[in-house]
Image (cartoon, rainbow, N blue to C red):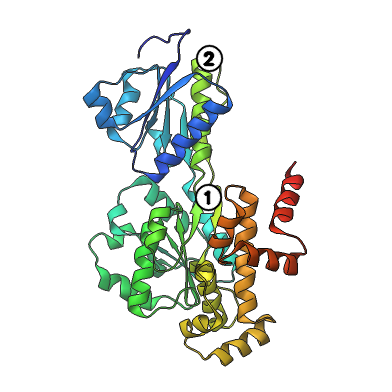
Amino acid sequence: MSSIRPDSSLRIVLQFDKGSGYARGIVAGVSHFARAGRLDWRLTVATAAEVRARNIEADAWIVDFDDDEARARLLQGTEAVVAVASSRSAEANCPPHVPLVMSDNAAMVNMARAHLQDRGVPALAFFSKGKYAGLSWAQEREQAFRAIPGVEEANILGSQRMLNAGDDALRNWLRGLPRPCGVIAVNDSSAQDLLHECAAAGVSVPDELAVVGIDNDELVASLARVEISSVVQDTGRVGRVAAQMLHARLQRSVLPDYRVTVPPAHLSIKASSMYQEGVNPIVTRARAFILQFAAHGIKSDQVAHHVNVSRSSIERIFSRECGCSVHDEILRVRLDMAKQLLRSGKLSASEIAVRSGFRTLQYMHVVFKRELGCTPGEFQSGQARQTV
């Protein structure tokens, strides 16, 4: 390690895979900590190969402990280094003097489990693509599922059994699951494959199988047949904690804990897990479809077509079981979308109107006044006052 230069900015290298959403979240967290603390850090993101090829030097490092080459840096005796790992098993191999920030895979699985059980799903299953066999984070997630009381071994299609299996094995497994059933996928990529095979096997989502992924991967979500409910890793917090540890080391401060495990942030609920115990399957499928496509300007007849019933039939079912019309349900979802976007404060009112399916700002104003008794602007400013 180069000697630290007190009168100039510190060169901090973040050694991660630049293409990974997981890594980007961590990098953003590090950057947020540095800006908030007004630290004079010159941040650089580089892969292990780039560090080797360009002979990059730094005053301090935050490294991906899951990467073999990055992990080797920890053994070079560098003092100002913090490790980040995707699983708690890293603790056994990380040098004791190196601060380590780990993801809590068991908490992610338990968050998905709690959501499915809250929805009233009577049985649980677990699915992992074979390509993840041997990866510590995938193993921890499968082990966490196996620790849930009462789960059936037959309901687990994990890495060991899928290593050499193909689509036929997956479809046969799907057909053999109890109905209804909640499936926790080891990650969103596995959830995407599972949803594709559900369609091929004639399994209806979410009324027969409610699916929850992990990692909230936006790229994967955009490719899925049904929008995926997913546990959101708190990668920003991982980055902030790692940066805080590094700052303490650079200041020669004593760290209260060299090992920190970061729980997930929350669960992003989408159409794939919108099962509800005791609700007519037609209503469940319709609500999932509305949740996914309300922002695209869908109408009641398109909802009826999706669930394969007549417009009059679905209106009778909604009136009897929900106390509202299909149009009312579409409007409710659009309002919820608009309120969420207004709370974020990141978009203009016109953009929010389009993104939430109202098409025009004028129509969104009319609906807000009629349903909530306020304009979108008044709603947003009221939310802002509540957070002060």
User: Could you tell which of marks 2 and 1 lies nearer the N-terminus?
Assistant: 1
Q: Secondary structure at mark 2?
A: loop
Label 2 neighbour load within 10 Å: few <14, some 14-19, many 20+: few
Task: Verify CB contact (< 8 Å) between mark 2 and mark 1.
Answer: no
Q: Is residue 334 above or below residue 187?
A: below
Q: CA distance from mark 2 to mark 1?
A: 32 Å
| Residue type marked 1 | Ala
Q: Secondary structure at mark 1?
A: helix
Q: Residue at x 33, y 38 (%)?
A: 17
What is the x, y in percent for residue 176?
Answer: 38, 77
Residue beneath disc 2:
251
Residue beneath disc 1:
107
Q: Does residue 377 appear to the left or right of 290 in the view shown?
A: right
Q: Does residue 44 appear to the left or right of 260 in the view shown?
A: left
Q: Quadrant of residue 224?
A: bottom left
Task: Answer yes or no: is residue 293 visible.
Answer: yes
